[in-house]
Amino acid sequence: MAEPEAKRVKTEYELIYWPGIPGRGEVVRLLFEEAGVGYIDTAKAAKAAPTTLSYMAATNLGDDKNPPVFAPPILKHGELVINQLPNILLYLAPKLGLAPASGDAVYHLNAIALTILDGLCVEVHETHHPIATDKYYEDQKEEAKLRAKAFREQRLPRYLTYVQRLLDGEKSGEGGWLYGGELTYVDLVLFQCLDGTQYAFPKTVEKLRKEGKHDGVFKLYDAIKERPNIKAYLESDRRIDYADGIWRHYPELEEDEE
Ligand SMILES: N[C@@H](CCC(=O)N[C@@H](CS)C(=O)NCC(=O)O)C(=O)O
């Protein structure tokens, strides 16, 4: 759970992200919340959007210690400034006790995180923006319908089957976690990405849950939701509601043509 505001301002981790949407920044928040480590969240501060935009500005060339970043989420820790969500997770997870700091596990976990983010974050975004990220959804609705159908029918079951394979594999160990017999950050990546996908495609995810082919995946999702720090966070006003971000709900993208 994040520490009270007074304590938080003294902490050293700073997450720079857009206000008003959970987005990729939410995965970073979940790591801090699970670990009970305080963090500054610029999305909740005054001038949240201008702060993010200042990092992305064409005139921002970084500094003598850091190259410029392309897009949020961005993590500032002391003098270090880094972007790319999986890169931020790679950096933070061992420091927060959510992954080993060395060995094969570092690369196994990164591969799992990248795969889940490909499937349940990037591909979900592409269901409503299949042609151009910088164009409105309304300008690509027809293509979005086709893309969403393919996602619902092929890609989403394929990714969930892969996650179930991870759980069925020897390397996941005991306890129902994705890797190594204990909770790691990739379990939190899965939680957020499945939660967002469920918000976007509620009927589809409900149908897949009922099918019973991915029981381990849904059991893991439910278990994360009940972890004390995560539960308190989800019930707090720090958890941002879904809106027009990566995980959006357009009912028509779950409807099939007659
Ligand atoms: N691969 C990058 C993607 C970053 C990204 O697309 N960030 C979004 C917000 S979640 C953004 O603001 N992008 C602005 C842009 O692409 O111009 C990551 O994982 O961090």
Image (cartoon, helix red, strand yellow):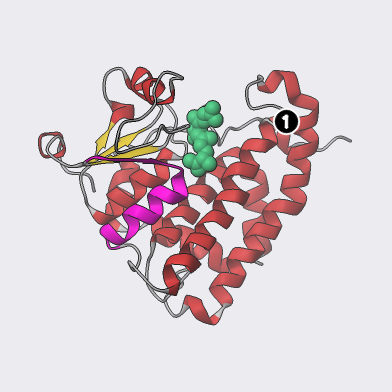
- Residue at numbered disc 1: 252
Q: Residue at x 65, y 58 (%)?
A: 159
Q: In this rendering, does residue 214 appear at all?
A: no
Q: Residue at x 54, y 55 (%)?
A: 114
Q: In this rendering, does residue 248 appear at all?
A: yes
Quarter-wise, where is residue 128 in the image?
top right
In the displayed image of the protein, which residue is found farthest to the right?
A: 258
Toward the viewer: 94 or 222? Answer: 94
In the displayed image of the protein, which residue is found farthest to the bottom?
A: 170
Q: Residue at x 26, y 24 (%)?
A: 45
- Specify whether tag 1 is near ligand 1 (CB below 8 Å): no
Q: Please count the marks in the image.
A: 1
Helix, strand or loop for disc 1: helix
Quarter-wise, where is residue 129 in the image?
top right
The image shows residue 163 at horizontal and vertical percentages of: 58, 64
Range drawn in magenta: 79-97
Quadrant in the picture for the C terminus? top right
The image shows residue 249 at horizontal and vertical percentages of: 60, 32
Residue 77 in magenta? Answer: no
